[in-house]
Image (spheres, rainbow, N blue to C red):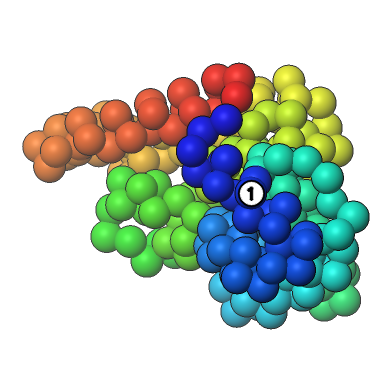
Amino acid sequence: MQGDDAELTVAVRAAQSGDETAFRTVYRTVHPRLLGYVRTLVGEADAEDVASEAWLQIARDLERFTGDADRFRGWAARIARNRALDHIRMRGRRPAIGGDESELAARAADADTAGEALEALGTGRTLALIAQLPQDQAEAVVLRVVVGLDAKSAAGVLGKRPGAVRTAAHRGLRRLAELVTAGPGGSSATAAGQDRRAGGANVSSGVTQLRARTQKDM
């Protein structure tokens, strides 16, 4: 178990015993990435409210949780996903990353370059890229890269087999790499040349590292 995971595991167990300081540590550690996941599901405007609802349930049910840091992140992500889907059903609309397995409409990016958007994965600046993936790929990428779950935990959140999550994450990152290389409104070949002149090697390296993270067994 890595140092950060060990610290989170200790904090979770202390929080289960009623330690409010430990619960604040858990919240500060998990919330930013959990919020990034919720944002991809419900959009920027509603993300904070849905995440708050998720944390209310997390606090309420914490005593019944069992497991280590990775299991806690998966458990929290599953709660957040359920709250997000409830919110979507109540509003009568599709998730921000799509309501089925079909391709999704793109959104305008706030980032200056696709490379910056990818590096900021988990923030609103990546919605233009994430929204172009099928739902299964988008959620697999966010859960593995942003939330930091291994394939087994991500599979538990999504109700799928770990192998299917690994495949979806791999395909999603490969597609994101293509989108980054192509750039906004340009062909892959043209954008590749521009990236090389503008230091695009760093972008390619970043994509490779993200892809590798989703393929390894944790």
Closer to the camera in the image, 47 or 76:
76
Residue 87 appears at what percent x and percent y? 81, 72
Picture quarter with the N terminus = top right
Q: Is residue 115 left or right of residue 199?
A: right
Kindly tell me whether residue 171 is visible in this rendering. no
Determine the residue positioned at 73% across, 20% down.
163
Closer to the camera in the image, 109 or 30:
30
Residue 38 appears at what percent x and percent y? 66, 62
Residue 36 appears at what percent x and percent y? 56, 60
Q: Amino acid at mark 1?
A: Val
Q: Is residue 206 above or below residue 142?
A: above
Corner quadrant of residue 217: top right
Residue 177 appears at what percent x and percent y? 41, 34
Q: Is residue 124 left or right of residue 103?
A: left
Q: Which residue is mark 1?
A: 10
Circle 1 packing at 10 Å, graded few (<14), some (14-19), many (20+), is: some
Q: Is residue 93 above or below residue 204?
A: below
Determine the residue positioned at 39% across, 54% down.
120
Q: Secondary structure at mark 1?
A: helix
Kindly tell me whether residue 57 is visible in this rendering. yes
Q: How many marks?
A: 1
Closer to the camera in the image, 117 or 4:
4
Q: Residue furthest left?
A: 197
Determine the residue positioned at 62% across, 64% down.
22
Determine the residue positioned at 60% across, 24% down.
218
